[in-house]
Every structure is written in structure tokens, then in C-alpha cells.
Image: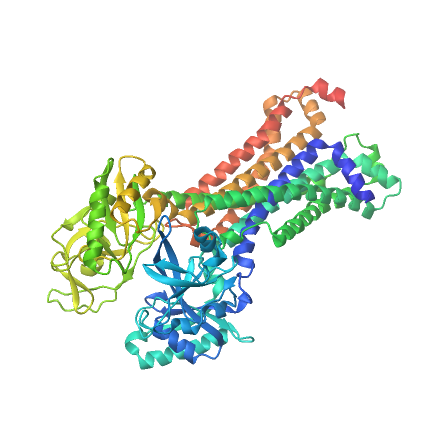
Amino acid sequence: MHDLKSAFRQLAKSPGFTAVAIAILALGIGASTAIFSVVHALLLSPLQYRDAARLVQLQSHHREQGVGNLAPATFGAVAAGNASLAAVAAQYYYYVNLTGTDPPALRTTADVTADYFKLFDVAPLRGRGLIPADAKPGAVPVVVLGHALWQTQFSARDSIVGRQIMLDDIAYTVVGIMPASFKDPSEVAQLWRPMRPGADNFLDRSSRYWTVFGRLKPGIALAAANAELATIARQLAQAYPKNYEGWTLEAADLRGLVVGDYHTGLLVVLGAVGCVMLITCANIAGLSLVRATTRRRELALRTALGASRGRLIRQLLAESLLLALLGGGGGVLLGSWGVDALLATVPEGWLPRADEIALNLPVLAASLGLALLTGVAFGLAPGFTASRIDASEALKDSARGSAGPSTRRLRAALVVVELALALVLLTGTGLLGRSFLGLLHKKSGLDASRVLSLTVSLSAKRYDSPAKRWDFYSRVQTEVAALPSVQAAGFTQTSPFRWGIPVGFTPLRADNSATTSELPQAFYDSVDVDYFKTIGSPLLAGRGFTPADDAKSPPVVILSETAARRYFGAENPLGRFITPGAPARFEVVGVVGDVRRSGLAADTPLQVYRPLAQRSTAFATLMVRTTLPPATLTKSVEAALWRIDPDTPVSDVVTMDTLVSRSVTQPRLYLTLFGLFAALALLLAAIGIYGLVAYSVEQRTREFGIRTALGASPGAVLALVLREGATLIVFGLALGLAGSLAAARLLQSMVFETSVHDPAIFLAVPLLLAAVAALACWLPARRAARVDPITALRAE
């Protein structure tokens, strides 16, 4: 306590040093706290399920078709034939219309197998969960509500349990309410229904659309479970080669799949924060060395009065720790604001486990530990340096004190490290920035300006035929197209830059025989006559869809440019046929431009379009092009739709500009974080080299006065000081370039169509850092060149 009180008094005597040190520490620890909050939530903390470490997701793998989910019959084989999993459950998502509410709402249900809630080991908050009897043929339709839906749609009324709600015009009895802490792994489902034979084909072996989860038995390792799954896969391939040849089965840690491709990026960002903290420590250590040097006489006097070396180190360390705690407190506050700002920039649903990101106890404990570690790190160097003071020599020295050679070398080394780390971060930012600008300049394939997108879901009970669905869509399209300021309106089954349905197609030869070439799946979509006009997709060959392409006319398709090239090569695709499987076959009547519907960072997909009049689905997206800001048209479009059917839900109202922008959310997030850290590193490095040169100028004032008195010009003095700074800059840049070349490989998965060793970046960034560092050297050097020799010598 005596040391802490003394430390507080010492820091109060130097308010400028204290304020600068606390500010630097707060910035460094604040950045670290914000990022560690994200890393802890996504990578370190277990999923919000009981004994979550034993939860896995089962996937099917094909050497050419990649990773997929499981077919229903595959799930049955795994559930019956495995001995490693205590429970196995499956789900798939489905959109349902919730009616009887104002307005009607589109909601996402997870249709699940009987053991679903048992697998996640969760009990309902109200009522009961699903039981095997609910899935039997003829059973009363039941549903379990998610907590958020219960609160927002039903005002958290307990009386809803046992009551009926209308889903797709079918009465479902609410049997339970799940707790707020329970969400499905993808955080998509708002309610849960049981799968049942008849409604779901449990014998299907080809459609891999079930997401399957498992819980390992106690003591069973993941490798043992995968060995058993490999055996099941071989047995299925032998029994059903048509469906399983080339496919394997594998269980993967559920948490890793939930985080997905954010794992590598977050670790790289965490490394960037580590660089910022190292620069922070180096900067504060440099300031502390300067301060310890100015206190040489005080420390020498303490030594002369009997203070031991350990006692001096302890005193200086106490000051450093006090500074670190004060800076850590400010850092936690900045970190809290940083987390809020970070979450505000990420669209909802784009960052996994986003609702778990917070300054919780583990994060606060880590911040406290980081602050204490930082205090020790930058406190030991000046402590050991000051403790080696020769008391008799120091007391003879000038009142200001002067740094010895070892201290100057240590400060110079710290500045070199700061410059090198700053260069690593700036280079990473440059590579990410170049990659991001390249993404923004990529053509999306559509004109997204002033286009409104909204989703419409029809009741399967009331619109139980393609003719009824097409009649609804055509009437809505006519109503909306007639609205003032609307230039065009068109329907599509799926939504570009949001989702799609991949289907395998086979091109037919000129003699109409099927080819045997392996081709990637194409997005299969149904669109109306005005869809391509609405999104601005150009017709490259053939014709577009016309009103004559109705349910009574021969089935036709329009291909995207890439699909036409992959299916037919250099041959003319018009008049040729493709098939999703016998006996269906579709004539190619047109070719349109590609749309990067999976995102600007994704490869251009193959796309096959059918006329909506020939393939009317119960789910579609309406696109509306307007001369006004699209958001101002929302109410008018909804009113037009509800004039035709007031019970049809409208959801996902968003502009196409927003959807295209969201497709680069992840690279934008990485660029923003790296840019902030690099700017902070550049500022700290500039402060470091400025402080070192400025202190050197102050210590050599008498020398500069003598040089000037003996005839040295201001330019010569200026060059003398700049040489000292230039030496540090050269060493820092050399070390930083080596580090940047090594670290650039870590960014390989985070950049798109950009070389991680881009020569332009590796030339421009060092020049930028050199210019900033040179400016930081020039300011104190200019002061040295203006030294008045009479004033300098009189002061001595």
C-alpha cells in the first residue's frame, strides 16, 4: 500500500505523462477487449447446450460434389446402425404462414424428428416438447413455439399452451414454449413441428436436405464415431451404389461448423490486436524509460539513503501497474463501446452467436490480466535500468539527468519494433483494402439501384394448384406495375444475393441422348415475363419468356451465360434441351447475363430459369423497380398485395442495394478492424519515434548550441538529427517487410483475386510509413536547428 500511495503521488506530479500513458493504454486494451469479446463468444465458449462438447453434426462428403447434408433414408440407417451416438436427430427448415394475426406473418419452422429436444437435452419453459406419438400418421398437428415468437406474436401469454394457431391454414395445437436460452444451431427456427411419414419421405435416398445432429456417448471420441460412420457409408454404397457410390459419412464438431469460415479470420484479427498491444507496451516502456531517466537524481538519492535494487524496481513497477489498471479501466469502457459499434455494423444473422458477444466475466478477467501483464511488461525495463544507477555518478550529473548508452539503445530498439509491427498491420490493411475494392468493382450482373425486394408466401391449402398460384402472382404483378413511380415489377421463386435452390441438370446431345459429363449443380429458378427487365439482366441470345409460355405450352428454359457455356461449350444452345432427370426435358429458348447471386466474393454460378406460369411455387420474391427511393414504396406495394389476399404474409422487405452490400459483410468487417488497428499502430509508432527524437534533441541542446556557435548551419544540425531518425526508420522498415512477407500468407483465405505478395502494396505501404515517421522526426529536428547557442549555453 505504501508503494501504491507513493506511485499515485508520483503520477500526479507528472499529469502530462500520466494522461498520455493512460490514453495509449486505454486504446490498446480497448481494442483487445472488444476483439476478445468476439473471439470468446465464437471460438472459446461452449455452445448454449448442456454438455455441448459432445454435440456433432453429421455430413455426407463426395470427392467431386463436396459436402452435403443427409438424405432421409441415410439418417434412418445411421440412427439404426450406430453405437457411438447416444441420440441422433434431424431437421429441415420450412416457411409457414402464421395467420389470424394482424398482419399475417411468415415464420420459419424446423420440422424435426422425435429425439430432437432430447438430443439437445433441453426442457420446455411451458408445456411439453415433442414426443414420438406426435409424428404418427393421423396424429393431431402440434407445434412448439420459440421464446421470441411467443413474446412478440402472442404477448408471452401462458394461455397459448393448449390453444390452436393457424399455420398454412391448418390448425396446430401449441403444446410447449421453449426457454429463451434455446435456439437451434443456426439460430433460424422460430417454432418446431414433428416430421411425420407421408408428409416427409423417410425412404428418400437421393435428396440430401436433412441437417442431422448427434450426441456422442460418454467416453466415445470423435475419431471412433467417424470410423463407425465410414463403415455405415461403405455398407450403403454396396447396397445402393446408385445413391451412395463415392459418398462418405463424417461427424464434425458442432461448434466449429456454427462458427464456419469466421474461425481463421478471427484468429488473424486476434493476431493483429496482439501486434497493437506489443506496440502499446513498447510505446509505454519508451515513455517510462524517459521518465526514469529524468528521475536519475531522485533514484540515486534513494539508493544513497539505503534503498535496495529490488526496492527501486518494486516502486517503479508499482507505478507501472497503477498506470496499467487506470488504462485498463478506460480500455474496458472503450471495449464496451467498440463491441456495440461492431455489432451495429454487422447485419443481423451474418455473425454467428452474435447475441452471446458481451463483456462477460471471462472477458473482463482477461482484460484485467492483460492490463496487469502490460504493467509488468513496460514496468520491468525502466525498473531494471534505473536500478543499475551509480549513485555517486548520478548525483554529480546535471539536474535533468541523461540517459546512458544502454538506455538509448533499448529505446531505439523499442521504436524499431513499433515501426516493424505497424508496417505488418498496414500491409495487411493494404491487401484487404485492395481485395475489397476489387470486390466492389465486380459487376453483380443486375442493376440493384432503386429495386425493392419482398417475399410472398402462399397458403398451400388455399393455393393448392399451380393455376391458382399463377393467377395470384399475375394479379399482384399487374397491380404493383400500375402503381405510380413503378417502372417494372417481376416475380422470382428465389432471391438473388439471399438464397437459391441448387439442382443438377444434364444437357442432351443433338440426338437428344444424355451426356455423361460431370457438371456442377445450377440454381433452379422460376421467373415471370418482366423479371429480367426489372433487375436489368440483359438478353444475350434468343428470346425472353412471353405470356405464351404458360402451363399448356412446351416446357422451356433460359440459361445464364456461364450455364450455356458449361452445358454446350462453343455450340449454339438455342433449340437444345437439358433435363433434371428423365422423362422431363426443357428446350433452351434464350441466354441471359450472369448474376453473382451467391455474393460478389463467390464464383459465378450456373443458373437455369423456368417460366413461373409453367412452374408456379407457393413461395416467391417480388422485385419492384421504381423512380423513387425504394423504401418509400413499401406500404403501397403491401397494400396492393393485400387487396388481392389480406391473409398472405409479406416479409424480408429490403432493397437490392442492401442485399448486394451485405454479400461483402465479412470482408468489410475484416478490413474495418484491420484498418482501425493499423491506424492505431501508425499513430503509436509515430508517437514513439517522435518521443525518442524529441528527447534526444532535449538532451543534446548544449551540444547543438556549441555546434551552432562554432559555425554549424541550421541545415547541418537538422541533417544530424534526421540521420538518427532515418537509421531507426530503415531498420524498422527492413524488419517490418520481413514480418509482412511472412504474415501475408495468413491472409490468403481473407483476400479475393489479390496476391498476398502484391508488389504495389509492398511498395506503397512502406513509403507511407516512412513518410509519417520522417515527419515525426522532422518536427523535433527543426526545433534543434533553431537552437539559440547563447540561450542554450546560459541554460547549462
At 35% from the left and 62% from the top, the residue drawn is 171
The answer to whether residue 689 of the structure is visible from this angle is: yes
At 43% from the left and 45% from the top, the residue drawn is 668
* Number of marks drawn: 0
Residue 419 location, x and y as percent?
Answer: 57, 41
Q: How is the image coloured?
A: rainbow
At 18% from the left and 69% from the top, the residue drawn is 582
In-front residue for pair 276/361:
361
Whether residue 539 sits left or right of residue 629 in the image: it is left
Residue 99 location, x and y as percent?
Answer: 35, 54
Residue 155 location, x and y as percent?
Answer: 47, 51
Up-down relation of residue 749 to residue 689 (above or below)? below
Residue closest to the far right:
305
In-front residue for pair 80/263:
80
Residue closest to the far top:
790
Which quadrant does the C terminus fall into? top right
Q: Quadrant of residue 23?
A: top right
Which quadrant does the N terminus fall into? top right
Up-down relation of residue 575 to residue 346 (above or below)? below
Up-down relation of residue 443 to residue 709 (above or below)? below
The answer to whether residue 279 of the structure is visible from this angle is: no
Up-down relation of residue 318 to residue 493 (above or below)? above
In-front residue for pair 664/21:
664
